[in-house]
Image (cartoon, rainbow, N blue to C red):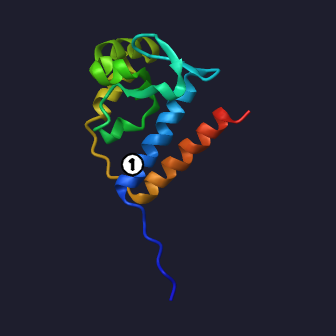
């Protein structure tokens, strides 16, 4: 009898997706391994930055939405609660008020992801990251 392969837990998949998504967002906005904080404009190496969210990560509908995320320094993201007002104003200037309003509305949608959905997103963001980081 073959031993069945256990499906990874939701917790494991979310953590893996968060990791690859964060790396992708920070790499997307980087130049030569350096990235600027979206809210205070300090520049640091990619590993020293976070993936900041305009709408909180607790909202799964916007958690992995690239338009909702930008690189942020630890100070802005953690100690200053993401500088949401500055983040929002800058996002409005960049994407338009309409898109920011869409993100505000989207956060209220209830998302019920299945294992395959997480695996698809992990694969997708891994491919996007590879395309950015492969010379």
Which residue shows up at 32% across the image and 23% down it? 101
Which residue shows up at 40% across the image and 10% down it? 40
Is label 1 in a helix, a strand or a loop? helix
Whole-percent x and y of residue 63? 37, 37
Whole-percent x and y of residue 48? 48, 25
Which residue shows up at 36% across the image and 35% down it? 62
Q: Which residue is mark 1?
A: 14
Name, please, the residue furthest toward the bottom: 1
Image quadrant in which you'd find residue 97: top left
In front of the other: 19 or 95: 19
Q: Is residue 120 above or below residue 18?
A: below
Whole-percent x and y of residue 131? 66, 37
Q: Is residue 5 above or below residue 114?
A: below
Total number of numbered discs in the rendering = 1
In front of the other: 97 or 88: 88
Image quadrant in which you'd find residue 70: top left
Relative to 2, 99 lies left or right:
left
Relative to 105, 92 lies left or right:
right
Q: Is residue 63 above or below residue 33?
A: below
Whole-percent x and y of residue 117? 44, 53
Q: Quadrant of the C terminus?
A: top right
Relative to 99, 130 lies left or right:
right
Neighbourhood count class around disc 1 (C-alpha, 10 Å): few under 14, some 14–19, many 20 upward: some
Which residue shows up at 35% across the image and 12% down it? 89
In front of the other: 97 or 87: 87
């Amino acid at each position: 009898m073959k031993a069945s392969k256990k499906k990874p837990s939701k917790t494991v998949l979310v953590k893996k997706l968060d990791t690859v998504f964060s790396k992708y967002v920070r790499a997307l906005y980087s130049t030569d391994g350096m990235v600027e904080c979206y809210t205070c404009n300090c520049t640091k190496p990619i590993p020293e930055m976070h993936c900041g969210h305009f709408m909180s990560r607790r909202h799964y509908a916007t958690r992995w939405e690239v338009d909702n995320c930008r690189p942020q320094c630890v100070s802005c993201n953690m100690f200053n609660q993401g500088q949401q007002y500055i983040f929002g104003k800058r996002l409005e200037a960049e994407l338009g008020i309409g898109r920011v309003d869409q993100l505000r509305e989207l956060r209220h949608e209830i998302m019920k992801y299945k294992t395959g959905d997480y695996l698809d997103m992990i694969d997708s963001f891994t491919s996007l990251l590879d395309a950015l980081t492969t010379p």
